[in-house]
Image (cartoon, rainbow, N blue to C red):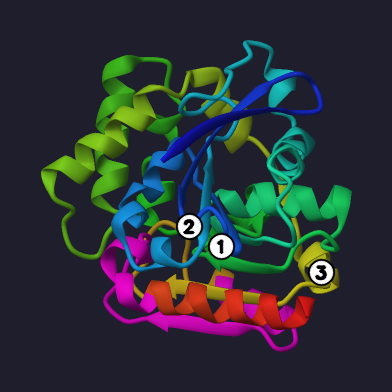
C-alpha cells in the first residue's frame, strides 16, 4: 500500500491510499459520512487487488486529510474539487469512480463542476444522489433516528449515536474489530465538519442523467441508512444503468456480499474499458 497526498483547489491536503496492481485499470473509492478511505481496507487482500489499481481517498475533514476549522471550507463544491484533485494529482486516466453513501454527494458535485468526460465509469454503492429536507424520505431509520446525535458536540452523545448508527449499517452484526475501526474513523471527524456536511441540501439527478460515462448501482435490499429507493431513482434516470439489488444485505455490500460486490465492480470496469477503446 502506498500513501500519497494531493492538494485541492483551496490548498487543502487530501490523503490518498493506493493498493492493488499499480499498472491496472484505476478505480477510485469515495467513502461515506464520518468514515475514511480505510473503509475499503478489506479490498487490499481481495480479488480486485490482483487486477486493478485501487485508490481510496479521505474526504476533507476525515481520516488523514486536512480538517480546516472554517465551515466554509466544507461547501459542497469543495468536495467535488477534492475528487478532481485526486484524479488529476495521480494522473488517473478514465478511472471508474465507486461512490458509497455520502460519496454520492462528492461525485455529484464533481459532475456538476467538471462533467463526466474524464471518468470511465461510475458505480454508486447505496449512494445518496439527493440530500436535505426534500430527500428525507429516501433515508432509513439508522440515519434519521441517529442524526441528532451524529451532529452533537457532546462526546458521549456522539459516541452513543455513532454506535447506534453502525449497528444499523449491516443486516447482520459486524464483528467487534470492524465496529472499532469504524468508530475510530468517526471519532476523528470534528463536529463542525459533521454539521457542515449534513446540512447540505442538493439533488444530483440532472448531473447523473447527463453523465457520459456508464453508470451502475449496487444496493442492499435491507439497507436502513440509504433506502434502496435511492438507487431505483438512478435506474430510472440513467438509460442502460445496471442495477444490482442484494437480498439480505444492508449498507455495506463490499463487506456483507463481497463476491457480488466484486462482480459488480468488474462489470462496470469492463464497460469503462470497452468504452475507452
Determine the CA span between mark 3 and mark 2.
27 Å
Mark sitting earlier along the chain (1/3): 1
For the residues labelled 3 and 2, say whether their Cβ atoms are less than 8 Å apart: no
Determine the CA span between mark 1 and mark 2.
5 Å
Mark sitting earlier along the chain (3/2): 2
Residue at 58% over, 50% down: 103
Q: Residues within 10 Å of mark 2 (few under 14, many from 20)?
A: some
Residue 54 lies, in percent from the top left, at 50, 54
- 176 or 263: nearer the viewer: 263
Does residue 54 appear to the left or right of 145 in the view shown?
right
Element under disc 3: loop
Quarter location, residue 258: bottom left
Does residue 34 appear to the left or right of 69 in the view shown?
left
For the residues labelled 1 and 2, say whether their Cβ atoms are less than 8 Å apart: yes
Which residue bears the numbered disc 1? 24
Does residue 2 appear to the left or right of 94 in the view shown?
left
Which residue bears the numbered disc 2? 21
- Does the magenta run of residues contain 30? no
Determine the CA span between mark 1 and mark 3.
24 Å
Above or below, 231 relative to 94: below
- 5 or 225: nearer the viewer: 5
- 21 or 61: nearer the viewer: 21
Residue 146 lies, in percent from the top left, at 37, 40
* Residue segment shown in magenta: 231-260
Element under disc 1: loop
State the residue lying farthest toward the front: 23
| Quadrant including the C terminus | bottom right
Residue 229 visible: yes
Residue 1 lies, in percent from the top left, at 41, 41
Q: Which callout, 3 or 2, points to the residue nearer the camera?
A: 2
Circle on res. 211: 3
Amino acid at each position: 500500500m502506498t500513501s500519497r497526498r494531493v492538494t485541492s483547489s483551496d490548498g487543502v491536503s487530501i490523503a490518498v491510499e493506493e493498493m492493488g496492481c499499480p499498472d491496472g485499470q484505476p478505480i477510485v473509492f469515495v467513502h461515506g459520512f464520518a468514515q475514511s478511505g480505510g473503509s475499503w481496507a478489506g479490498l487490499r487482500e481481495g480479488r480486485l487487488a490482483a487486477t486493478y489499481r485501487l485508490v481510496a481517498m479521505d474526504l476533507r475533514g476525515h481520516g488523514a486529510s486536512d480538517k480546516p476549522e472554517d465551515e466554509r471550507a466544507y461547501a459542497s463544491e469543495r468536495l467535488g474539487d477534492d475528487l478532481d484533485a485526486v484524479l488529476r494529482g495521480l494522473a488517473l486516466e478514465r478511472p471508474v469512480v465507486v461512490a458509497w453513501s455520502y460519496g454520492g454527494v462528492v461525485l455529484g458535485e464533481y459532475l456538476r463542476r467538471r462533467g463526466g468526460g474524464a471518468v470511465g465509469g461510475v458505480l454508486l454503492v447505496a449512494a445518496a444522489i439527493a440530500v436535505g429536507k426534500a430527500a428525507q424520505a429516501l433515508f432509513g431509520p439508522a440515519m434519521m433516528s441517529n442524526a441528532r446525535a451524529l451532529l452533537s458536540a457532546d462526546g458521549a452523545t456522539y459516541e452513543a449515536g455513532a454506535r447506534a448508527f453502525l449497528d444499523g449499517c449491516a443486516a447482520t452484526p459486524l464483528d467487534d474489530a470492524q465496529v472499532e475501526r469504524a468508530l475510530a474513523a468517526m471519532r476523528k471527524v470534528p463536529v463542525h465538519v459533521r454539521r457542515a456536511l449534513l446540512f447540505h441540501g442538493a439533488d444530483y439527478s440532472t448531473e447523473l442523467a447527463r453523465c457520459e460515462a456508464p453508470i451502475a448501482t449496487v444496493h442492499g435490499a435491507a439497507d436502513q441508512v440509504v433506502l434502496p429507493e435511492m438507487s431505483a431513482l438512478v435506474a430510472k434516470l440513467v438509460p442502460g444503468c445496471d442495477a444490482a439489488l442484494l437480498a439480505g444485505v444492508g449498507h455495506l455490500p463490499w463487506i456483507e456480499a463481497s463476491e457480488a460486490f466484486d462482480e459488480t465492480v468488474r462489470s462496470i470496469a469492463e464497460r469503462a474499458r470497452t468504452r475507452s477503446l
